[in-house]
Image (cartoon, grey):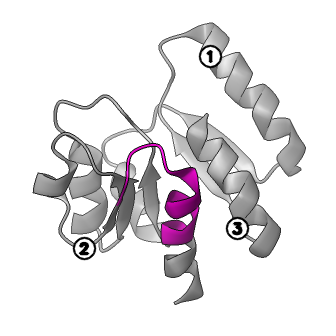
Amino acid sequence: DDLIRVYTQVLQQYPDTVLIIVGRAEDEQYMLKLEEMAKDTDGRIIFTGVVSEEMLPQYYAAADVYATCSQVEGFNLTIVEAEKCGTPAVAFDHGPHSEVMEMGKLVENNNLDKFQEAIQSYLDS
């Protein structure tokens, strides 16, 4: 939900951007909450559900930036995957993120304004 909050702010300055959320939520109520939040974006948020391992690199490579607002990670493999596909990542600076990130930006935990700025810095380039 933090990523959707950030994205709605990004969308104000970059109205042509699209947020693609890949994967599934384990909690059905939480997924309904996310879908409700997405309604205000006029279809600019796409929920793909589960994507095959073969298709994931295409999603990463097509993105201008990979963003994760995850606060609970043992090892964030998705950051590594995105960067191996040439896509910079933006993530909160906690857990293993500083160890795995090579070309992205780490943001102070829970600072959504800085998270938005980090995403926009990649959209500006």
Of marks 1 and 3, which one's residue comes earlier in the chain?
A: 3
Give the side of residue 36 with respect to residue 59, left or right: right
Query: Distance between the Cα atoms at labels 1 and 3?
Result: 24 Å
Question: What residue does disc 2 label?
Answer: 103
Q: What residue type is labelled 1?
A: Tyr
Q: On the image, which quarter does residue 84 sit in?
A: bottom left
Where is residue 58 shown, x and y percent of the image? Answer: 41, 61
- Magenta segment's dominant SS is helix
Secondary element type, mark 2: loop
The region drawn magenta spans 107-119
Q: In which quadrant of the rendered image does the N terminus lie? A: top right
Q: Crowding at label 3, few (<14), some or many (≥20) Cα neighbours within 10 Å?
A: some
Q: In which quarter of the image is residue 124?
A: bottom right
Residue 14: where, in percent of width, then height?
74, 74
Marks 3 and 2: which is nearer the front? 2
Where is mark 1, residue-wise?
30
- Residue lying furthest left in this view? 99
Q: How far apart are marks 1 and 2 (CA)?
A: 31 Å
Amino acid type of disc 3? Thr
Residue 36 in sight in this render = yes
Instruction: Kindly identify which numbered label has been placed on residue 106.
Output: none
Which comes sooner in the sequence, label 3 or label 2? 3
Residue ranking furthest to the bottom: 125
Percent of width and height locating residue 12: 81, 67
Seen at 70% across and 67% down, the residue is 17
- For disc 1, the neighbor class at 10 Å (few under 14, some 14 to 19, many from 20) is few
User: Which residue position holds label 3?
Assistant: 17
As helix, strand or loop, the secondary structure at mark 3 comes to loop
Tag 2: amino acid: Met
Helix, strand or loop status at disc 1: helix
In the depicted structure, whether residue 30 falls above or below residue 67? above
